[in-house]
Amino acid sequence: MALPPHGLPSAAALTASPRTRGVFYGWWIVAAGIATQFAYSMQNNSTFGVFLYYMNAELGWSRTLLSAPQSLGQIPAAITAALVGPLVDRFGTRWFIGFGGLVLGGAFLALSTIQDPWQFYLYRGLLSSIGAVCVGGFIGVTISNWFVQKRGQVLGYMGMGGSLGTGPCHWDEHPGAGAPVCHIWR
């Protein structure tokens, strides 16, 4: 925005819509929301079943022991959501999504080092649940702030990212069915 000689922007420049200067910035927020939901869904929800067989074979743990952190992790997730929700209203989502990404990423990196069940419960049940809530639970707030008329449509697009994130590894759910990337869980 070029300033006139007196140094103050004109009223027309101040009221100009972001849409007149290219792509509406809210669509970039939607794209980030789709990517966030894709990563969140792929990392946290659906793909764990792919690794269950291989973890059971390598560690010798029962499937109950391996599956329990997913269920038990809902407790810290609910507590985190209740505590972080009011903070998101006050401070916005940017820092919580970044914090959640670091916690979630660190938890998944730490999963490659597990030797005992308590480590698995800590990384998968507690830390990844807390990180996942911060990453995936509040992006809709940011998107809702950018759209009024098309709010339902763009939130649907954001949900599409989560749906797309559930499938990339599922074609290799059965032992010996394909790519070795899903056969190595560490």
Image (cartoon, rainbow, N blue to C red):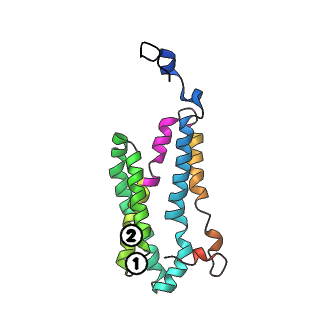
- Dot 2 falls on a residue whose secondary structure is helix
Camera sees residue 72: no
Within 10 Å of the Cα at label 2, are there few (<14), some (14-19), or many (20+) other Cα atoms?
A: many
**Residue 150 counted in the magenta span:** yes
- Dot 1 falls on a residue whose secondary structure is loop
Decide if residue 97 is on the left or right side of residue 177. Answer: left
Within 10 Å of the Cα at label 1, are there few (<14), some (14-19), or many (20+) other Cα atoms?
A: some
Disc on res. 41: none
Instruction: Work out whether 9 lies above or below 23.
Output: above
Residue that mark 1 sits on: 114
The residue shown at (54%, 62%) is 42
As measured in the structure, the alpha-carbon distance from the residue carrying label 2 to the one carrying label 1 is: 9 Å
| Outermost top residue | 6
Tags 2 and 1 in contact by the CB under 8 Å rule? yes
The residue shown at (61%, 57%) is 164
Camera sees residue 61: yes
* Amino acid under disc 2: Tyr
Tell me where the magenta segment starts and ends, as one range: 135-151
Query: Residue 101: where, in percent of width, then height?
Result: 43, 57
In this view of the protein, which residue sits in the foreground, 165 or 152? 165
Instruction: Work out whether 101 lies above or below 58.
Output: above
In this view of the protein, which residue sits in the foreground, 164 or 18? 18
Residue that mark 2 sits on: 123
